[in-house]
Image: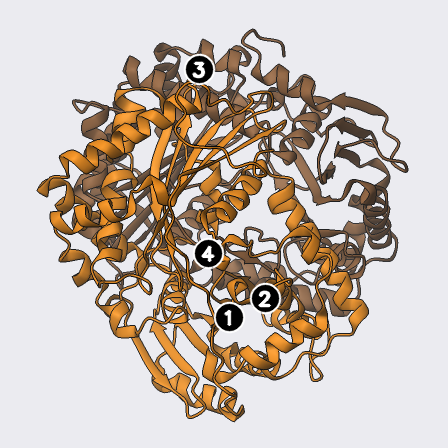
Amino acid sequence: MSPWRPMLARSGVVAALAIVCVLALRPIAPAAATEVVRVVSPGGIEAWLVEAHAVPVIALSASFAGGNGSDPAELAGLANLTSYLLDEGAGDLDSATFQQREADTGTRMWFRDGQDRFAVNLRTTTEYADDAFELLHLALTAPRFDAVPVERMRAAVLADIRDNVGNPAWFTWRAFYDLAYPDHPYRQPSRGTVATVNAITPDDLHAFVERTFTRDTLVIGVAGDITPDELGRRLDEVFGDLPAAGSQTVLPDQAPGAAGTRVLIEREGAQSQLLMVQTGIARDDPDYYAALVLDHIMGGGSMTSRLTREVRQTRGLTYGIFSGLYDYEATRQWVIAASMTPSSVPEAIDATLAEVSRLRDEGVTQEELDDAITYLTGSFPLALSTTGDIADILEGMQVYDLGIDYLDEHNHRIAAVTLDQVNRVAHERLTPDAMTILVAGPAVDGFTPDVVMNGQELQARELATEPTL
Amino acid sequence: MHRVSRLLVCALLAGAALPARAEVFDAETFTLDNGLQVVVVTNRLAPVVTNMIWYRVGAADDPVGHSGLAHYLEHLMFLGTEAHPEGDLLEIVARNGGQQNAFTSWDYTAYHQSIAVDRLPLMLELEADRMRDLSVDDARALVERDVVMQERLERIDNDPAGRLGEQMMAALYQNYPYGTPIIGWEQEVAELDPAVARDVLDRWYVPNNAIVVVAGDIDAETLRPLVEATYGTIPAGPDPQRHRVSEPPQFAPRLVALSHRDVQQDEWLRYYLAPGYITSDDAVTPYALQVLNDLFGGSLTSRLYRNLVVEQEVAVGAGSFYSAGTVGPSQFGLYATPRDGVSLEDLGQAMDAEIQRLLTEGVTEEEVAAARDRLQIDAIYARDSVGGAARMVGAALAIGMSLDEVQAWPDRIAAVTVDDVMAAARQVLDANQSVTGWLQRDGDAPHLASGGSAPVIPGVIQ
C-alpha cells in the first residue's frame, strides 16, 4: 500500500557487507538529454527506444493499465499474486523448465503490480536475447497457473503479508487508507488479506491476464544494445498476439478524505512512525512543475530541504524526513514521513507544520528557487546511468503522456518556473491545517488524537482467515 | 515478484557484492607522489561521473569503548570545514545538480557524489578540503549524535530483523571486531566524543590511506591533472596500520532465538565463518565459495530453493549468500522462510539435511559449470552501471586487493573445479563455527526440547 514499497529484482539474492549511510536514502527522480526513437513494429506495436551499444545488455520496461487498485474486493491481492506466477510455467514449459531456462540464460524478468498499472521488466544480455524475448512472450501470453506453483506462490504471498504487517510504516499507511478512502477500491491492501488471497483460483488469474494484458493500454520503453529494426521484430514476437483490447475498470476519482484528522495507531515501539498527508497535484496540472520545485524546497529528496534542516539538522529528532507528490489514476497525495523517538512526536509535528505554514504564508526566496532549479535540472542526467533506468523512464514518459521530447523538455519546464508561481502554488495548495496526521506508536503527552486505532487489531484484520474488511 | 528474505533487503540496497572485472570495466590506475591511489572506470553512457573517495578505516578499527566512531565521523564530515562551513558543502553540491552520500562498513568509509562531468573539479576540491579539515562546533556535533541515535533506532532497535542480525554477528565473532555493530552499541553511541572522531580523521584520512575512484564519462588522461591540483597538494601522513585481533578456532554451534511482538512471519538464518579474499590461506577458496553459493543457494534453480521450497514445501523462500570482500574473516550465510505451520526447528533440520547431502554426495560437473557461466553473465550486467562499477572496484582496493587481482576475477571463477567447490564446502560448512538465528513470533518461546542440537546461549535470547 505504501508508495515506497521497495522493488527488488528477483535475481537479487546476493550478500554484501552491512553498510550504514549518513543520510536516509530516497529514490531519485528521472532523466536527461539522449535521443529517443519511436519504433513502430510491422504489426503496429509502438515502443520508445534509446540505443546504447557500449555494453551488450538490453533493458525493456513495459506496463499495462490495471493494477492492484482494480482488484475485486473479494479477490484483493489478485494482481500481486499474478506477478509472482507469470514465470512459474508458461506454454509447453512447466515451472521447473521455465525457471531453469531463465537462470541458464541469465534472463532477469520480473513483474510488479502498481496501484494503477501492471509493470513488466526484462533485462538480458545480447547473447541470450532470443531466449529472453521468447520467455517473456510465453509469460505474457500463455501462463499456465498450474496448481502446484499457484499454491507455492500463494504461500509466499501469505508470508509476505505476515512480514509486511510488522513494518512500522505499514501501520500509518494502513490506517490512512482506511480513513481517507473508506469506500474506494484503493482502500484494499495491495497484497490482499490472508482471506482474499486464499480465495483466488487459477481461473481468476487467467481472467486477470485476459482483461489486463492487451495492446490498447500497453506502453514500452527499451534501452541498450538493440537496433530499431531488431526491436520492431521483437515487439511483434513478444506482444503481437496479445488481444487488441480488454476491459479495464475505471476507478472513481477521489480526493483523500479524513482531512485535518489526527490519528493514533497504538503500538509499542522504540520509535514512532509519523505520516502526514494532504491533497496532492496531478502531473498534468498546469501548476505541477511549480509544485515539484516547491516540494523539493520543502522536503523532497535533498539534504538541503527545509524540513531536513528544521527537524534533523537543527533539532536532531530524526534520521530522515521526506516529502513527496504522488499522482495516482484516481487520487493525488502530498506526503511527509519520518520516524522518531515517541516523546519527540509532538515537537516534530509542530516543527513540520510550522515550516509548511511558513511556506504557505511567506513563500520561498529567489535564492531557494534558483538553487532548486539548478539542482533539479543539473541532476537530471544522473538517473540515466544504466540501461534499466533509461527503459524505466521511457515507459513512465508514455504513461504520463509527457511527449517523446521530454528528456530535453524536462529541464525547460523546470527552468521556466517563476517565484510568483511557486509562491502562489504554496499559498493555494499547501494546507497545513487540513493535513491528516497519523502516528503509529505509544500514546504520548502533546499529541491528542481524534481517532485511536489499535495496531494489533489492524494486523489481526489483515491476517484473519475469514473476510473482515 | 518472488520473495526475497527481508533480512537480506538491507544488503541488497547497500549494493550487491558483485564481482569486479577490471578489464570489463576498462579500469586504469595511477598513484600520486603522496601515495593516493586513483582508479578511473570509463563509461560513456551519459555525461556524468560518480566520484568516490575510500578511506581504509572502518568500524572494525574503532577503539574499544567507542563503537560507532567511524560512522559518527562519516556524519560529521558533512558538517563543514573552515573553507566550507555547514550548509555550504551540502548546498554547493546540490546547486551543481549533484547527489551525494557516504557509507561506512567494518573495513572502510567512502564518500561519493554523482554529478555532471564538468562539475568534477569542484567535487575533487571539496573532498580534498575535507580530507584535511573538519570544523564543527561541539554543540552541533552533539545534535548529530542524536541523529545517529535515531538512525540506530530505525535500523536496529525498531526492526526485529535488524536486531537479530546484530545479535547473531555478536555471537559469531568471539574475538574479531565484526561482532560489534558498525553503528555502535547503544550506550556507546550515546557517549561518542567529537574530539575522538577528529583523531580518526587526523590519523586515518591521509592520501596514503585513501583511494579515489571516478567512474563515468572520463579517462585517466583527463583526470590526472585534476587530482594532482587538488589531492596532490596534500602531504602524506604516517602510514596508518590496522591492528586487528584474530578470530580463534571455534568449537560449538550457537543459536540465537529472538521473539518479538512485531514479528508475524518467522525466519531462519545461519552464518558460518568463512575465509574471504584477504584471510583465505589459498587463492582458490574465495572463488570456489562464490561458485558454491550460486549453485547451492544463489537462485530459484539452486539446490536450496528447489529442494526446500519446490520439492519438500517446507519453505516459501530459501537461499545462501557470501561476500569475499572483507579484511577479516567473512561469512557464508543461509536463510529460509518457513511455510505456514512449519516450525523453525523442522526447517533447520531440512536445511541441515541438504548440507549433509552436499557434503556426502558432492556436486556435479554440470552444476559447477552452470554456476560458473551464470557468474560470468553477472559480470556483464555489472558493466552497465556507472555507480556500481565504482563501488565494486573501490571496495576491492579498500580491503587491500590489487587491481590485477580484481582483473583476474573472471579467470579465477572459470578455473573453479568440482574438487575446489567441495574442499571449500567442507572447510566452511562446519556447524561448530556457525550461529543459527531464529526470528519468531512473540509467544513462540524458543523450544529445543525435542532433540534440538544447538545450545542456547544465555543472554542473547530476548
The residue to which callout 4 is attached is A405
Q: Earlier in the sequence, mark 3 or mark 2?
A: 2
Residue A270 against residue A30 in the figure, above or below: above
Q: Position of residue B69 (x, y in %)?
A: 62, 65
* Side (left or right) of A37 relative to A189: left
Quadrant location, the C terminus of chain A: top right
Residue B231 against residue A385 in the figure, above or below: below
The residue to which callout 1 is attached is B57
Q: Earlier in the sequence, mark 2 or mark 1?
A: 1
Mark 2 and mark 1 residues within 8 Å of each other at the beta carbon: yes
* Side (left or right) of B153 relative to B208: right
Mark 2: which amino acid? Ala
Q: For the residue labelled by badge 3, is the local secondary structure a helix, a strand or a loop?
A: loop
The residue to which callout 3 is attached is B341
Corner quadrant of residue B48: bottom left
Q: CA distance from mark 3 to mark 2?
A: 43 Å
Chain in orange, by letter, is: B
* Side (left or right) of A413 relative to B454: right
Subunit of label 1 = B
Chain in brown, by letter, is: A
Q: Residue A58's mark?
A: none
